Amino acid sequence: MTGPTFSLLPHRGVIAIAGADRVDFLQGLISNDTTKVAPGQAIWAALLTPQGRFLNDMFVVDAGGDTLFLETERERAPALARKLKMYTLRSKVTVEDRTATLEVAAVFGNDAAKALGIGGAVSFTDPRLTALGVRVIAPAGQTAALLAANGVAEAPLAAYDALRLELGVPDGSRDLQVEKALLLENGFDELNGVDWKKGCYMGQELTARTKYRALIRKRLFPVKVEGSLPEPGAPVLLDGEEVGELRSGSGDRALALLKVEAARAGTALTAGNARVTPEIPGWMRLPESTAP
């Protein structure tokens, strides 16, 4: 049995939301229930367009004092921070992009929980799947030393990405098209990214309608790739008919947004010169049939 390992996630950044109204402020904007956030207990959520389409994904975690951290995509963090500032109005909150001073790591494998509670860092169990381990936010340049001092060995980003892809878990805009993707096509329901009992939030109407009218015809699936991995966006074909397209991938693994019936057919699909075999992860709930 090997111990836990960690990968630094240089493509992830951090925004700080501070002030007395921080919980209520986010509650009216994102897809999950911010009141569930507690020390060591984070939520995963999304900010949507008013039409219910994906804008940003984020983990929300208690950073201590009157501050919440939003762990989100690094390159898109400045734009997200600007957007959030537009919504503050009279709320007693401040919004600060701290990506330059903080970094993110994922700890995974056996005994990943030993990374919880490490001094000098904010850590939390990944709220999507326990198999994804623990996320750690620490001062830039210090995370590797903090984890190594606690017996956690470093692994390349590709090691964590392989785990994520095998489990079929999306990674922000690498897998969800901005202003187009629907949360329920991309696992946000089963992966604990939506709360159905909270109050209104931006984009709620379409998200709820998609669920209760069973309008899901496509889903993001993990796929096994035989041959050269095509670029993201490559069409996926079944008997010459387009049934979806690839998203992020690495090595012989990828994610693909596919018609549910095509993924269930049990037939290898093609993308470019590669064979693509969809898998249905244990966490995914599919309707009996999506045929019209």
Image (tube, grey):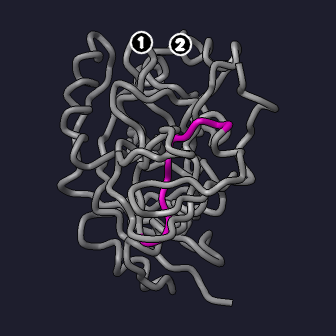
**Above or below 12: residue 29:** above
Q: Is residue 76 left or right of residue 234?
A: left
Q: Residue at x 61, y 57 (%)?
A: 268
Q: Which mark is residue 206?
A: 2
User: Which segment is the magenta one?
Assistant: 251-261
Q: Relative to 12, is 5 above or below? A: below
Q: Decide whether residue 257 is among the magenta residues.
A: yes
Out of 255 and 207, give the one closest to the viewer.
255
Residue 32 in the image, given as x and y percentages of width and height: 55, 29
In this picture, residue 282 sits left or right of residue 182: right
Please state which amino acid type lies under the numbered disc 2: Leu
Does residue 134 appear in the picture of this structure? no
Q: Amino acid at mark 1?
A: Gln
Q: Residue at x 43, y 24 (%)?
A: 26
Q: Residue at x 35, y 63 (%)?
A: 9
Marks 2 and 1 sit apart, C-alpha to C-alpha, by 7 Å
Report if the CB atoms under discs 2 and 1 are less than 8 Å apart.
yes
Q: Which residue is mark 1?
A: 51
How crowded is the residue under tag 1: few (<14 C-alpha within 10 Å), some, or many (20+)? some
